[in-house]
Image (cartoon, helix red, strand yellow):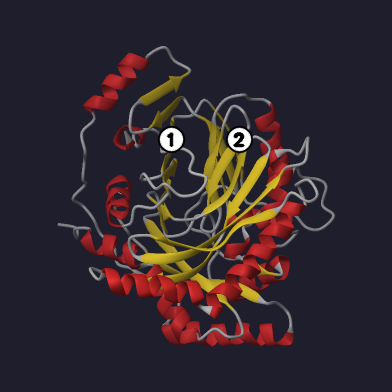
Amino acid sequence: MLNLGNGFNICAFLDNHQYQLPAHEQECLAGFGMVKEVKCERSHLHPGDTSTVRSLDQLQQFLNATDDWCFGHLSYELKNEIEQLSSSQNDRIGFPVVYFFVPEYVLQLNEQELSIGSFKEDHAQFFAQLCAVELTNDEHISVHVQERMSRAQYISTIENIQQHILRGDCYELNYCMEFFAEDATINPMHTYQLLTQISPNPFSAFYKVHNSYLLCASPERFLRKKGSALLSQPIKGTLKRAANDTAEDEILKQRLYTSAKDRSENVMVVDLVRNDLSRVCKEGTVKVDELFGIYSFPQVHQMISTVSGVVNDGISFAEIIAATFPMGSMTGAPKRKVMELIDEYELTARGLFSGAVGYISPEKDFDFNVVIRSMLYNSAANYLSYFVGSGITWYSDAAKEYDECILKAAAIRNVLGKLQPAQ
């Protein structure tokens, strides 16, 4: 199915990989081709500027005019409009700040059946194409990954951030660093397939907008709406797994569950999410459904909490996003201040990284991931990028935080190591 979708200029392929996590929704959902779209490029709005229609307003107008499936993304850079910030870092991948599209074909797959919907009356022909498509693997591969900052630079930066925490500027900050490759040539679809073989995760996505690609193996949900219920599942707390040692693996799970540092970070982001949801939910309905849940994935154990609420009547998608985006797990607290510090200390614009990709159903329900554990690739510029990060507090050990970042990128490094060099 994915192979056929890659033949379209616009493609969103969302794959759960059969994880049965709490609030499980779609097994596999895809949108191929584009019937209509809304695209909002990077803006430079300043406080008080009313001369430009904001991205979320444009998006809401688009959604109001359609009752069809919509797929798309919210870039981290949308925070400039939501919080009236500005940043000057370069983003070489080229995704718009906001992009959504009504697909030509919608495919829903579960263990029993495949459902195909389209604007065309060629379902049988399309299904025949789907069955006939062959797996391809471009042998011409060239990737030489570089680090944007050295280990020593990272440690120095974290120590500077901790001085801000000591002064009371913030409590926690999610700091990310970029690894990149110039003159990179990959087969995006094959690379994504390798990534999800090594690290299948419940919020994975292959997402393509012309020459810009997201190859995502995310374990984290940003926000889901089903009926009047909103639900967010932030992740804070990561520990490696013990390969081939079940007893040791259980010990590591318990160590993560009892970790005072990880609990402190997790409860901080839970409080932030509760505050965000309370801005759009009915009074008294926001609650923590699960605190400090430990869930296991191929490379790591994760501490995941679940927060929910009942949305106010008449609240629009744009209003919900304005209240909750970017997600607290990728910023820190207080949110606006840490985003200013992120712009000061990070060397590259995050772009789609730590943004969200997902869908909006005809009933106006939606589900979006957090874009982490992902590769970003621009096939025109031959530029490949991936980010890793962690939550920094006053008690963080900078060297250990660096090691945690490298652990989170293990699956991506493994994939890039398996790609064949150019002949």
Identify which residue, 374 or 26, lies in the foreground.
26
Q: Position of residue 140 (x, y in %)?
A: 21, 52
**What residue is rendered at 50% in x and 78% in y?**
259
Asked if residue 148 shows in the view, the reply is no
**What SS does tag 2 mark?**
loop
Amino acid beneath label 1: Leu
- The circle drawn on residue 29 is 1
Earlier sequence position, callout 1 versus callout 2: 1
* Count of numbered badges drawn on the protein: 2
Q: Position of residue 162 (x, y in %)?
A: 62, 85
**What residue is rendered at 14% in x and 57% in y?**
423
| Residue neighbourhood size for the residue with mark 1, other residues' Cα within 10 Å, grouped as few (<14), some (14–19), many (≥20) | many
Which residue, given by chain and number where applicable, does mark 2 sit on? 365
Q: Position of residue 385 (x, y in %)?
A: 41, 61
**What SS does tag 1 mark?**
strand
Asked if residue 137 shows in the view, the reply is yes
* 75 w.r.t. 358: above or below: below
Q: In the rendered view, does 252 fall on the left or right side of 355?
A: left
Q: In the rendered view, does 11 fall on the left or right side of 261?
A: left
Q: CA distance from mark 1 to mark 2?
A: 14 Å
Amino acid beneath label 2: Asp
Give the farthest residue toward the top: 121
**What residue is rendered at 62% in x and 41% in y?**
225
